[in-house]
Image (spheres, grey):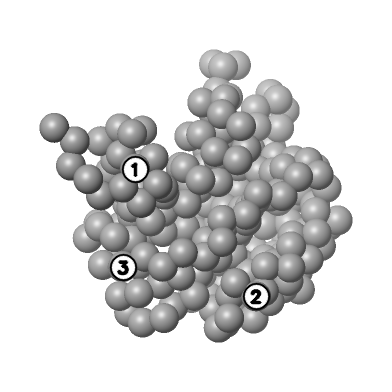
């Protein structure tokens, strides 16, 4: 009614308690009724699912079925939705891109309402060195950011940073190729900062991260 263009839901909130699960379902149903786009980041958390798997699987399946934009990593899709995928956190990430595409293909078959599917790609080389990439499917097109090495200060928040950047770029009306680039750079900014979230000064700063430009602008 108020012109909201997009509602973003996190599986972390949906699984926090029975009350928050019902709340997220109500929000998703209202958004669908009013024609508002729904973004759902699965955000599976094992400790939240203990003893509640059947309840949460049903909630996640309904929200995922209504979502226009569906996001998760390989662990999220397998454990929250039961979709077969690559080994979580495995080595040789760059060589497994086709396996991730196959997983997204199975997600698309199971949840065909969505028009955008995305997953982050992360290989932990050490605590402070990660390979960071992403995969995006929009319609029949694939957009891939091959894993690139980044220096990590606090790994928490990378996935949320990616989603935030992707949704920002989407709402800005940029082409899908830039959605994944801006999302990748926003996630990289989050994990190379000491906070759980990215705080870019402006769009230019995020694009500088994508380009690997560390020069100072005066």
- Position of 206 compared to 100: left or right? left
**115 relative position to 172: left or right:** right
Whichever of labels 3 and 1 marks the residue nearer the N terminus, that label is 3
Q: CA distance from mark 3 to mark 1?
A: 17 Å
Q: To which residue does mark 3 refer? A: 152
* Outermost residue, top side: 2
Q: Do the numbered discs 3 and 2 sit on residues whose CB atoms are within 8 Å?
A: no
Relative vertical location of residue 210 with respect to residue 204 in this rendering, above or below = below
Disc 1 marks which residue?
208
Sooner in the amino-acid sequence: mark 2 or mark 1: 2
Q: Residues within 10 Å of mark 1 (few under 14, many from 20)?
A: few
Could you tell me which residue is drawn at 76 percent across and 45 percent down?
Answer: 141
Above or below residue 128? Residue 43 is above
Spatial distance from mark 2 to mark 1, Cα to Cα? 27 Å
Residue located farthest toward the right when viewing the structure as drawn: 109
**At x 39% / y 40%, what residue is drawn?**
207
Q: In screen coordinates, is 48 left or right of 216?
A: right
User: Given contact means CB atoms under 8 Å apart, are the residues at marks 3 and 1 in contact?
Assistant: no
The residue that label 2 is drawn on is: 95
Depth check, front residue: 106 or 96: 96
Where residue 205 sits, quadrant-wise, is: top left
């Amino acid at each position: 009614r108020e012109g909201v263009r997009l509602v973003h839901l996190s599986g972390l909130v949906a699984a926090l308690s029975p009350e928050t699960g019902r709340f997220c379902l109500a929000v998703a149903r209202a958004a669908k009724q009013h024609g508002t786009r729904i973004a759902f980041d699965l955000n599976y958390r094992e400790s939240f699912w203990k003893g509640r798997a059947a309840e949460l699987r049903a909630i996640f399946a309904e929200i995922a079925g209504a979502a226009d934009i569906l996001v998760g990593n390989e662990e999220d899709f397998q454990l929250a939705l039961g979709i077969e995928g690559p080994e979580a956190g495995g080595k040789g990430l760059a060589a497994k891109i086709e396996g991730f595409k196959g997983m997204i293909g199975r997600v698309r078959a199971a949840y065909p309402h969505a028009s955008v599917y995305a997953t982050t790609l992360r290989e932990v080389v050490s605590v402070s060195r990660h390979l960071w990439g992403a995969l995006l499917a929009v319609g029949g097109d694939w957009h891939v950011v091959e894993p690139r090495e980044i220096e990590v200060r606090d790994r928490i928040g990378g996935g949320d940073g990616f989603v935030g950047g992707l949704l920002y770029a989407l709402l800005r009306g940029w082409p899908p190729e830039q959605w994944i680039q801006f999302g990748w750079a926003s996630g990289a900014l989050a994990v190379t900062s000491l906070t759980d979230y990215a705080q870019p000064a402006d769009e230019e700063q995020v694009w500088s991260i994508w380009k690997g430009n560390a020069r100072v602008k005066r």
